[in-house]
Amino acid sequence: MKDAITDARTLGKPKMLLLGLQHMFAMFGATILVPILVNSYFYEATGEPITQGVTIAVTLFCAGAATLFFHVVTKKKVPAFLGSSFAFLGGFATVANLNTGKFAGMGANEKVSYACGGIVVAGLVYLVLAFIIYRVGVRRVMRFLPPVVTGPVIVCIGLNLLPSAVTNASQNWILALIALATIIVLMVRGKGILKIVPILMGIVVAYIVAVVMNACGMTNADGSAILSFAPVAEASWVGWQGFQIARFDLTPTLVMVPISLAAMMEHVGDVSAISATVGQDFVSDPGLHRTLFGDGMATALAGLFGGPANTTYGENTGVLEITKVHDPRVIRTAAVMAIIVSFVPKFSSIIATMPTAIIGGVSFLLYAMISGIGFRNMVENKVDLAKGRNQIVMAMILACGLGLRSGVTFNLVGATVTLTPLAIASMVGIILNAILPGKDYDFGTHSKG
């Protein structure tokens, strides 16, 4: 891809470290939000906080280790970061509220270990699809996933994430707009190192402003303090993550496994987005079977030791698009940083003081650019939207992905299962593309396919 940097070593080690730090900041807010939300589910259900498994430290360690494992499996070719998956939050909430049989009166830590057991099995389901792709070939599988399907799904990925960015930004629009404006200015006018670390600089500039505003007695829109350093003072310098081994039971497993179907569809969309961003066909090389195996196995291993499910992160895909630095080594640098930070509660607490408004301002642009990648994917593959069948496929994907805001919830063996809007959109798109006549795309014959 024109002007892209594929070997970050040419920039020198200091710049590589800055780029890695930028990727870590990009994933940090969303990654630590998952254990925070999971802890709230179990605290509300049991009255006890989670002290082992699915904590911030465990989550950061699992994200870093999962990313490194994924890169090994994918021959170090795919510049993807694996962070905490939001798809399984509904599953954690369901397990937290199980109050029958052995789960009646069960404590938070024990309950979450059974939820993680379901995550292990859900991750192993990925391996089944990976094996099918390996046996029948990616060409046959991708017949069901042409750009008229993956493009709108990528658009939905970005647009579904945007409301969370707006919610975060609304905490303090001044900080959000400062972060956003800094990034845009540096993307357009930046020179040298500032050109390739606009997101990190946006965070730094906005954080400095936040410190000044806090010192002047200003507050967020809801009256809360812009910054609070109390958790930093209480945190220790070195700490152990608090792993715990997963436990297994049929009920939590039946809650988590159906969610893996949605997560796998999101995985295909994410890999397509990364391929479109970098300009390389990762679906064929190293192969969708390898990316699925890496993601699924990483999720299973994370769950085994008390971590949440992992997924390829759109935030980092947005960073790739902005910086044009596509070297997977930078992602691995961020992964190592995440592992190191997981052992330093003090540093984790400092990063966690970042106002959510800053995260919102940064994410606003990242998520919008992901949707832009989806549109570009359709344009580059010359998707003919003058054809009625292509219009129907795209329209139904967008309608389901954006219209079904709460997804679809149903009961399965006594447990509540929710299919996310993105999962429904993916399934509807695949089915319509398969049954409607007039297919005009053949995987492998399009140079950018």
Image: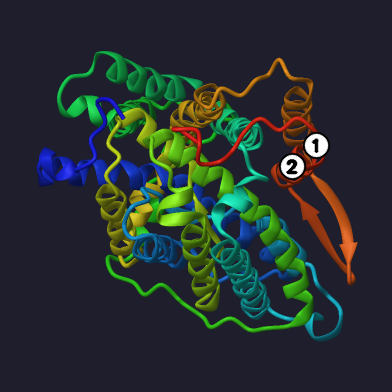
* Image location of residue 333, percent across then percent down: 26, 54
Task: Tell me, yes or no, if residue 157 can be seen here.
Answer: yes
N-terminal label among 2 and 1: 1
Q: Residue at x 15, y 24 (%)?
A: 192
Q: In which quadrant will I find the N terminus?
A: top left
Please give the count of numbered marks on the rendered protein.
2
Q: Secondary structure at mark 2?
A: helix
Classify residue 428 as left or right of residue 341.
right
| Residue at (45, 35) in percent of width and height | 276
Q: Can you say whether 367 is above or below 308 in the image?
A: above
Query: Which of the 4 quarters of the picture holds residue 280?
Result: top left
Q: CA distance from mark 2 to mark 1?
A: 6 Å
Q: How packed is label 1: few (under 14 Cα within 10 Å), some, or many (20 or more)? A: some
Q: Which residue is mark 2?
A: 421
Amino acid, disc 2 = Pro
Q: Residue at 29% of width from left, 55% of height from top?
A: 332
Q: Which residue is mark 1?
A: 404
Q: Are marks 2 and 1 in contact (CB under 8 Å)?
A: yes
